[in-house]
Image (tube, rainbow, N blue to C red):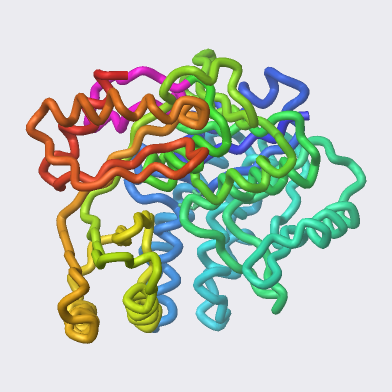
């Protein structure tokens, strides 16, 4: 069976609902569907989720929220009219309408997916199963056993289910939101619970490109990649798929197929445990505005007191580093840009404490540029040709991070060289 998740752009208006219905009905194996809230449409440039967040904020500040409510009601009523649905919109909106009703922001925001799922369930004549009735979070983690137990209590039929994405219930029995874009995660959780054969993720692009299209126009498409490769690319900023949604399907080896609701015939991108052709480079990604901190001291590996002082100082100021690399005399750490006077003062103190033996070097405005491929595991020396290429240009490579058995290599370059470095690496591959 297939769990299909449709994102906000796929659910933006009645025309999109029609496409979604055609897709669902074209394959009888698509028997469980997760939806995001109505996305931006031609008539309404704001996502339903953002409209609800605004409404909730106005409401809690005791300000006028009628305008927002009217806009939301119109969106739902337009879809109802265009698709000749039976849903009672007035009844549906009652909980968020009443000034007496003190719903939390999470409860109000979650109504975006709830309303959307209710409309789609009516349109398809399928059963709507509320995510809050079974997806359970315990200690910030999905409790799969409890979620499955609850799902089994709600329905024996694992057919023709519509589930609203983006929210769950926590151990205090409150509705809690997943992170923004979390509908992908809800779909992955449902695929896990139902032991799906495939998790389809329907969106508005025909899969993942090798490079951010803002840097390279019409770059090659990635037809197949592994969960780990997707995780690395998502971590460095590709936005087609929410990175938190990888784990629930990866642990059961359920492949993901990313597809385009507006062009369902396009192949899209498939995410699998193992690639059929793991020889080529999968993708390029990166992010700007990073800081490199480098500690250098003769035999730093034998006396780690300077490292301990640095780590304690970072800990006390709640800094998490992104990457680190060690060598006999050096430790290099990479952070999201730090321009914090307190940290600079603390680093000065460490420098004074270890005075003459230790050098601390901080570089700001650094960009990270990564090449991701499973083939780097078997052929780590592939990195050499990319370094050569960067070396021959006037791009100054500040650092290279590549761990043993790693599926990525990360270069640190100046922010201003970010796009050129990515273009150069892409053209070299
Ligand atoms: N509606 C939520 C958001 O806008 C969740 C999602 O779309 O997946 O972030």
On whether residue 218 falls in the magenta region, the answer is yes
Q: Nearer the viewer, residue 312 or 291?
A: 312
The residue sitting at 41% across, 50% down in the picture is 47
Nearer the observer, 148 or 235:
235
Residue located at (50% from left, 15% from top)? 266
Q: Position of residue 98 (x, y in %)?
A: 54, 75
| Residue that protrudes farthest toward the top in the picture | 265
- Examine the structure image and report whether residue 225 is included in the region drawn in magenta: no
Tell me: residue 202, above or below residue 182.
above
Task: Say left or right for 30 vs 354.
Answer: right
Q: State the quadrant of the C terminus.
A: top left
Q: Is residue 92 above or below residue 424?
A: below
Q: Residue at x 46, y 56 (%)?
A: 180
- Snapshot quadrant of residue 363: bottom left
Q: Residue 350's quadrant in the figure? A: bottom left
Residue 251 appears left or right of 277: right
At a point 78% along the width and 44% down the height, the residue shown is 127
Provide the residue span drawn in magenta.
205-222
Q: Position of residue 209 (x, y in %)?
A: 38, 26
């Amino acid at each position: 069976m297939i769990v299909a998740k449709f994102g906000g752009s796929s659910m933006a208006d009645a025309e999109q609902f029609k496409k979604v219905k055609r897709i669902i009905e074209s394959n009888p194996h698509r028997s469980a569907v997760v939806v995001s809230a109505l996305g931006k449409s031609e008539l309404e440039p704001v996502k339903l989720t953002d409209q609800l967040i605004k409404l909730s904020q106005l409401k809690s500040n005791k300000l006028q929220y009628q305008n927002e409510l009217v806009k939301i009601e119109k969106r739902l009523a337009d879809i109802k009219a265009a698709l000749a649905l039976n849903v009672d919109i007035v009844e549906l909106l009652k909980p968020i309408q009443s000034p007496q009703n003190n719903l939390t922001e999470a409860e109000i925001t979650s109504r975006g997916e709830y309303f959307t799922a209710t409309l789609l369930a009516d349109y398809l004549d399928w059963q709507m199963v509320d995510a809050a009735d079974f997806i359970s979070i315990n200690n910030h983690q999905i409790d799969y056993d409890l979620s499955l137990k609850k799902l089994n209590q709600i329905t024996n039929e694992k057919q023709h289910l519509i589930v609203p994405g983006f929210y769950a219930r926590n151990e205090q029995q409150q509705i809690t939101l997943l992170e923004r874009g979390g509908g992908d995660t809800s779909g992955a959780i449902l695929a896990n619970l139902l032991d799906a054969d495939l998790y389809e993720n329907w969106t508005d692009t025909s899969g993942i490109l090798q490079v951010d299209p803002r840097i390279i126009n019409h770059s090659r498409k990635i037809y197949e990649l592994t969960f780990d490769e997707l995780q690395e690319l998502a971590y460095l900023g590709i936005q087609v798929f929410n990175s938190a949604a990888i784990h629930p399907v990866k642990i059961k080896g359920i492949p993901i197929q990313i597809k385009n609701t507006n062009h369902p015939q396009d192949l899209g991108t498939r995410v699998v445990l193992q690639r059929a052709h793991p020889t080529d480079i999968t993708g390029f990604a990166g992010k700007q505005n990073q800081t490199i901190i480098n500690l250098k001291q003769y035999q730093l590996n034998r006396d780690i007191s300077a490292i301990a002082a640095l780590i304690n100082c970072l800990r006390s100021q709640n800094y998490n580093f992104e990457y680190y690399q060690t060598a006999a005399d050096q430790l290099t750490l990479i952070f999201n840009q730090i321009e914090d006077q307190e940290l600079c003062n603390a680093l000065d103190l460490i420098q004074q404490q270890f005075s003459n033996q230790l050098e601390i070097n901080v570089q700001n405005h650094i960009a990270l540029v990564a090449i991701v491929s499973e083939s780097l595991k078997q052929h780590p020396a592939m990195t050499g040709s990319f370094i050569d290429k960067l070396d021959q240009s006037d791009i100054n490579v500040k650092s290279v991070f590549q761990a043993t058995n790693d599926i990525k290599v990360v270069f640190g370059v100046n922010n201003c060289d970010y796009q050129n470095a990515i273009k150069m690496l892409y053209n070299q591959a």
